[in-house]
Image (cartoon, helix red, strand yellow):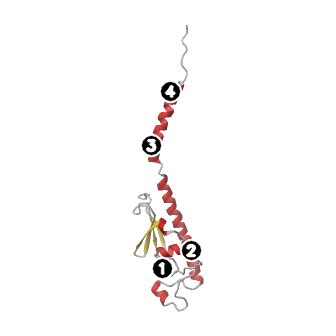
Amino acid sequence: MIKAKQQGFTLIELIIVIIILGILSATAAPKFINLKGDALKSTLDGFQGALKGANTLVISKAALAGEDRIADADAWATNTANTAGVDIGTGTPIKTEYGYLPASSSALAAAMDINLSQWTITAGTNNLTISPAGATAATCNFVYGVATASASPTYTLYSDADFAC
């Protein structure tokens, strides 16, 4: 009798390989796919974009009212025509700094209609450090620097090399 040559794998061999691949992917995939970190980064990018948009609207309203050169809250107190701030249509006037939003979480909340409990906002000298609540604020943040007499506000995302959410 001529012995038949085996061609291919048996069904049990294929099933064992599929099971092994499934176990490997279930244990290794979460180490390579950081969905939470990516979501937090996207959230920060969205917040940063919304803040830029809000600031564009605020400077437009301030310029139209002729109040885009007022430096700070003290200068607003001596502004003869309006001491309350720029009315941006939210019912809460904002005392801008050179026409832009000041380093104040309440001003951000009023201008952007955000829930402050979802964010960690830390005030610094002429800036705010903003990160999503629950994220590592030291490495998952961006810094909003207020406007000065000669410069627009700055929006600095934590350096990409060290960015970890």
Q: Earlier in the sequence, mark 1 or mark 3?
A: 3
Look at 54% across and 88% down and name the residue there. Answer: 82
Q: Residues within 10 Å of mark 4 (few under 14, many from 20)?
A: few
In the rendered view, tell whether residue 17 sits above or below residue 68: above
Question: Mark 1: which amino acid?
Answer: Ser
Q: CA distance from mark 2 to mark 1?
A: 17 Å
Disc 1 or 4, which lies upstream in sequence? Answer: 4
**Number of the label disc, if any, that sits on residue 56:** 2
Residue 150: mark in rendering: 1
Frontmost of labels 4 and 2 is 4
Q: Nearer the viewer, mark 2 or mark 3?
A: 3
Q: Nearer the viewer, mark 1 or mark 4?
A: 4
- Residue 84 in the image: state x and y as whole percent: 52, 85
Counting residues from the start of the chain, the first of labels 3 and 4 encountered is: 4
Q: Position of residue 37 (x, y in %)?
A: 47, 55
Residue occupied by mark 3 = 28
Q: Could you tell me which residue is drawn at 49 percent across and 37 percent down? A: 22
